[in-house]
Image (cartoon, rainbow, N blue to C red):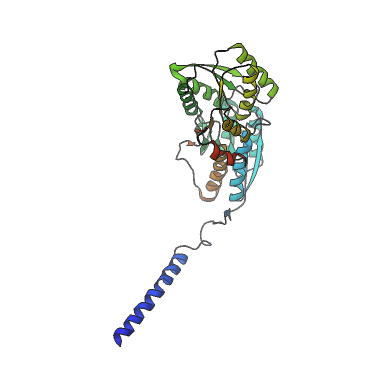
Amino acid sequence: MFRSRRRAIGIALLMILPLILAACSTTGGKKAAQGGSSVAAGHANTQRYTIAMITHAAPGDTFWDIIRHGALAAAAKDNITLKYSSDPDPTKQAALIQDAINSKVAGIAVTDPNPAAICPAIQKAVSSGIPVVMFNAGVANWQQCGGMSYFGQDESIAGVAAGKRLATAGAKHVLCVLKATGQVQLEARCAGVQKGLGSEGTMTKVYVNGTDNAAMLSSMTAKLTQDKTIDAVITLGAPVALVAIQAISSAHSNAKLYTFDTNAAEIAKIKSGAVQWAVDQQPYLQGYESVDSLWLYLTNANVIGGGQTVLTGPAFIDASNVAKVAQYAQAGNR
C-alpha cells in the first residue's frame, strides 16, 4: 500500500517538475520592465533621439540610397528621428555639420572625404558634447577627428585586393576612373590597385565628372580610343560603371570592366557578364551600424570597435554569388 502511494507521489512529482522549471525559466532574473530599457517586437522602447547623418553624396549617386536604407532601418528599430543631409562640396558639408551642432542633435554620423575642411567641424561637434561616429570616408583620420567608431572599408586594403584580382585575371594596363577630385578615399583606391598589380601591370588614372553622364562618356571614350593598350577599366562607383559600358563599346575597346560599389542595375550587368566583378563595401551595413551604434551609446554607453576600424568590406560580387545578392539589390539594399 505504502509502496503504491510512494509510486503515485513520484509520478505526480515527475509531471509537476517540468511546470515548475518552466515557471522559473520565464520569471527568473530581472523582469524586462525593471531596470534598463527594453526592446520589444523589434522596436526600442527607449527615449526618442534625433541623429543627424551628413555625407558627401553627389546628386543622383544611387550608392547613397543604399546607405540611407540601412540608416532608416536602424532608426525605425531604435526609435530614432533621422535627419539626413549631404553636399559633395567639403566646405558646404562642414556647414551642414555646424547646422547639426546648432540644432543640438543627440548624435552625428558623418563621412570625411576631405579632412582639411571637415575634420575641424567634427572636432567642434565633439567638443560641444555631441557623440560622433564616422563611416565610409575618413578611415585614416577618424580617431584624430574625435570619432567614437568608424564603419567602412579601408580603401587601401580594398584597392590592393582589387589590384591582385586584376593581376590574376591577366590585366596589363588598367584605367582607374575617379568620379571626383580631392577625395582621399578615391585616391586610396587607385593607389591600392596600382600596388596590388605590382610588377604584373601598369595603371593610368582619369578624372571624370561623376554627376554628368554625358561628360563621363566623352572622357572615358576619348581615353579608350586614344590608348588601345588599356585592357581593363575599373570604376569607383556603380553609376560610372554603367556609363563605362557605353564608353568601351563606343571606343571599340576590348577592355574588360570592373568596379567598386554596386546598385541594382550594376548587379544585373554582373549577371550578364558586362561587368566582371564589383568590390562591395556593404553600404547598407555602414548606414545601419552608424545609427545603431549611436543609439547604443545614447541608451547604454556602448562603444563599438574597441578603438579599431569596424570593416564592412571589401567583399567581391562576381558570377559565383551574384544571384544571391541580386534579390537584395532589387530591394535597394545591396
Q: Is residue 140 left or right of residue 16?
A: right
Residue 275 to residue 129: above or below = above
Say which quarter of the image contains residue 84.
Answer: top right
Q: Between residues 99 and 151, which one lies in front from this camera angle?
A: 151
Q: Between residues 66 and 183, which one lies in front from this camera angle?
A: 66
Q: Between residues 206 and 307, which one lies in front from this camera angle?
A: 206
Q: Is residue 29 left or right of residue 266?
A: left
Any part of residue 20 in sight? yes
Q: Is residue 164 left or right of residue 50?
A: left
* Residue 68 in picture, x, y percent from top left: 62, 40
Query: Residue farthest to the front?
Result: 272
Say which quarter of the image contains residue 13.
Answer: bottom left
* Residue 220 in picture, x, y percent from top left: 63, 18
Any part of residue 131 in sight? no
* Residue 132 in picture, x, y percent from top left: 56, 39
Residue 239 to residue 297: above or below = above
Residue at image coords 47%, 16%: 201
